[in-house]
Image (cartoon, grey):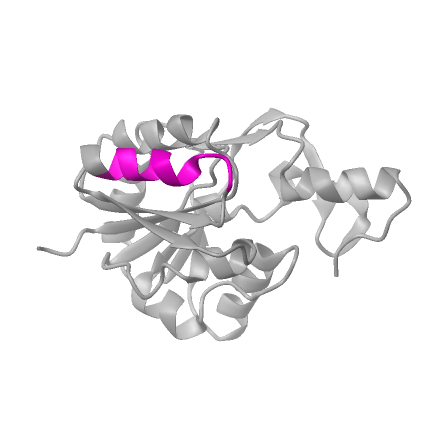
Amino acid sequence: MSEPFFSIILATFNRAHLLPRAIASVLRQEFGDWELWLVDDGSTDGTGELLREFCSREARIRSLHNPHQGLAKTRNSALDQVRGTYTTFIDSDDEYLEQHLSLHHDYVKKNPGVDMLHGKVLVVGDPYVPDARDLNQDIAIEECTQPGTFFFKTALLKKLGGFPELSFGEDSALLRKTVETGHQVALSPFRTYRYYNTEPDSMCNQVKAKRKQGLSAPK
């Protein structure tokens, strides 16, 4: 089997009610040379059965099923499996616009010196999330690092070891590491990723809920 241009990693935990939207947005892409890895982080809500159903329908979709271990480890567990020239991501509560992969394919082909690409998002819901540098403060999503917009040369992402295993802010930590190790990073000119900040179980909203309760934010 030939290697796809893009490997897409979707990590999920107890999001069976949201997964169809995210997966459908990948299936609607104008650019079709991709594989999608659905990585289940030990869900207990029927996610496993749903993933097997999608895999049976579409040969480009594959799944991994892990014990519960957190987002960074769950994403990283797929790195040994991906075969694409570039690796990108989608969160289980988000979606791609139809031109997302085609526009970024054309960009990286025209700019082969770029090792990692990231960009801005279209926000649905609360426009603010906790600031990874100070979890007691909020920051506009427009100013944040968004892992769903990451496009990495796969060989580089594997060399870097994937996402640092932090409880929060692993995306910005990976971006910093990429820059600090001397690799070329560019900001995408396209806003083709729809970010939903509407789910109470998201990491950002869990941090906010703990703040309201007077509990310590994760380290």
Q: Is residue 176 above or below residue 74?
A: below
Q: Residue at x 87, y 37 (%)?
A: 212
Image point (64%, 38%), residue name:
141
Q: Is residue 18 visible?
A: yes
Apparent side of residue 95 relative to residue 198 in the rendered image (left or right): left
Question: From what the image shows, is residue 129 above or below residue 169?
Answer: above
Q: Does residue 178 show up magenta in the picture?
A: no
Name which residue lies at 40% across and 26% down: 21
- Asked if 63 appears above or below 52 in the picture, the reply is below
Specify start and end residues of the magenta stretch as a single range. Answer: 44-55
Q: Is residue 185 visible?
A: no
Magenta-span inclusion, residue 54: yes
**Residue in front for this viewpoint, 91 or 12:** 12
Q: Residue 201 appears in which quarter of the rendering?
A: top right
Q: Position of residue 144 (x, y in %)?
A: 62, 45
User: Is residue 7 toward the left or the right of residue 190 in the image?
Assistant: left
Seen as rendered, the residue at the extreme left is 1
Left or right of residue 198: residue 78: left
Q: Is residue 176 left or right of residue 47?
A: right
Magenta highlight: main SS: helix
**81 or 86, which is in the foreground?**
81
x, y (%) of residue 194?
Answer: 48, 30
Percent coordinates x, y for residue 62 in the rendering: 26, 47
Q: Nearer the viewer, residue 14 or 145?
A: 14
Q: Residue at x 23, y 59 (%)?
A: 83
Give the quadrant of the C terminus: bottom right
